[in-house]
């Protein structure tokens, strides 16, 4: 089984729990997720299976969209509702001022990773240090908030909005920083991932559904094939280069037969470093390649010996 499953991680599960349960259901260890969701968060968690595990790091880079809720006036050590309260302050900001503060974070910003996070420092995860009562300096990191939408005031100094952001963005830290900007503190009370790359919440499967579909022999049709994970250009390599192609050698532009997608696309028109899918003369996927100096070099290789016909 090779492909990507769009899993709905339920609140209370860790991302590791999801992978462990899928390994049991699918009876394979070649499974990996594409970006940790906190145990108290829910939503989209794309999971790579078989050959697709080679795509995990590329999928992790994709932008994500979250629905979040925050409460003003209370700060916690974890920056969310599941930590210990560290400060309480009166909230004086009106809804318009809160909205302005929230939207002021759109763009390229700097975030300091929270102590309760899996970021490593000195060989240890920050949450391990935090649980031992140790707080250390954490260098700020650049992240991008691509957009904020659906801002709404709720009851009791609480607000809800959606955030589209880059990899590595901590939404609870965003909520904390909004509270700091308003001078009253804040913490995150809800987090749901609505989208990760091309994977959407409304097509995500809960683990119970995955198990039922697997038992019924119907799960394969819910797998996204490896070559549908990205919108990379697609090219077919001519038969004369097969021996070198199957060995993982760089492919000169001269051996590109045509666009595998049937488009009028030529390798020379690509930007330096652009990624593409390459197929052999039989239109079997070989891998993801990177354009470099009139050649395509292997980035992720999917060919397995015995799949191709050398008699060409």
Image (cartoon, rainbow, N blue to C red):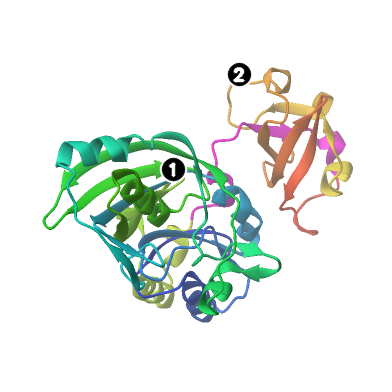
Is residue 266 or residue 84 the one in the foreground? Answer: 84
Q: Which mark is residue 165?
A: 1
Q: Which mark is residue 295?
A: none
Asked whether residue 108 is in view, the answer is yes
Q: Is residue 232 magenta?
A: yes
Image quarter where the C terminus lies is top right
Q: What residue appears at the point 80 percent right and 59 percent down from the top-left corner?
A: 305
Q: Position of residue 200 (x, y in %)?
A: 36, 50
Q: Estimate how packed mark 2 is, as few (under 14), some (14 to 19) or many (20 or more) residues with alpha carbons within 10 Å.
A: few
Is residue 201 or residue 302 the one in the foreground? Answer: 201
**Does residue 121 appear left or right of residue 66 in this picture?**
right
Vertical position of residue 59 compared to residue 237: above or below: below
Is residue 275 or residue 103 the one in the foreground? Answer: 103
User: Considering only order in the chain, which callout, 2 or 1, is on the residue closer to the N terminus?
Assistant: 1
Q: What residue appears at the point 76 percent right and 58 percent down from the top-left corner?
A: 304
Q: Which residue is mark 2?
A: 264
Q: Is residue 268 magenta?
A: no
Vertical position of residue 275 compared to residue 88: above or below: above
The image quadrant that residue 186 belongs to is: bottom left
Vertical position of residue 311 compared to residue 100: above or below: below
What secondary structure is marked by label 1? Answer: strand
What secondary structure is marked by label 2? Answer: loop
Q: Magenta stretch? A: 224-242
Q: What residue appears at the point 49 percent right and 75 percent down from the top-left corner?
A: 22
**Does residue 132 appear left or right of residue 64 in this picture?**
right
Asked whether residue 312 is in view, the answer is no
Q: Position of residue 56 (x, y in %)?
A: 60, 56
């Amino acid at each position: 089984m090779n492909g990507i499953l769009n899993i709905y991680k339920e609140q209370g599960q860790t991302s590791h729990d999801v992978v462990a349960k899928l390994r049991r259901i699918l009876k394979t260890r070649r499974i990996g997720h594409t970006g940790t969701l906190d145990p108290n968060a829910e939503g989209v968690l794309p999971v790579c299976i078989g050959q697709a595990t080679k795509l995990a790091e590329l999928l992790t880079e994709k932008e994500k969209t979250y629905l979040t809720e925050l409460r003003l006036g209370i700060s916690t050590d974890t920056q969310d509702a599941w930590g210990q309260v560290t400060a309480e302050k009166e909230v004086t900001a009106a809804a318009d001022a809160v909205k302005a503060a929230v939207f002021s974070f759109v763009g390229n910003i700097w975030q300091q990773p929270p102590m309760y996070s899996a970021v490593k420092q000195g060989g240890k995860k920050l949450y391990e240090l935090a649980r031992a009562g140790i707080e250390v300096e954490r260098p700020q990191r650049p992240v991008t908030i691509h957009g904020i939408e659906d801002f709404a005031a709720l009851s009791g100094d609480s607000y809800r909005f959606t955030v589209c952001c880059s990899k590595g963005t901590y939404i609870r830290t965003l909520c904390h920083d909004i509270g700091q900007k308003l001078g009253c503190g804040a913490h995150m009370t809800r987090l749901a991932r609505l989208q990760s790359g091309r994977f959407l919440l409304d097509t995500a499967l809960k683990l119970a559904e995955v198990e039922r579909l697997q038992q019924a022999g119907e799960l394969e049709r819910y797998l996204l094939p490896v070559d549908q994970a990205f919108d990379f250009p697609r090219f077919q390599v001519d038969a004369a280069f097969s021996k070198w192609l199957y060995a993982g050698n760089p492919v000169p532009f001269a051996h590109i037969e045509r666009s595998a997608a049937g488009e009028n696309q030529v390798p020379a028109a690509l930007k330096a470093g652009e990624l593409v899918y390459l197929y052999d003369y039989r239109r079997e996927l070989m891998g993801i390649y990177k354009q470099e100096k009139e050649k395509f070099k292997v980035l992720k290789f999917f060919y397995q010996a015995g799949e191709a016909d050398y008699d060409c």
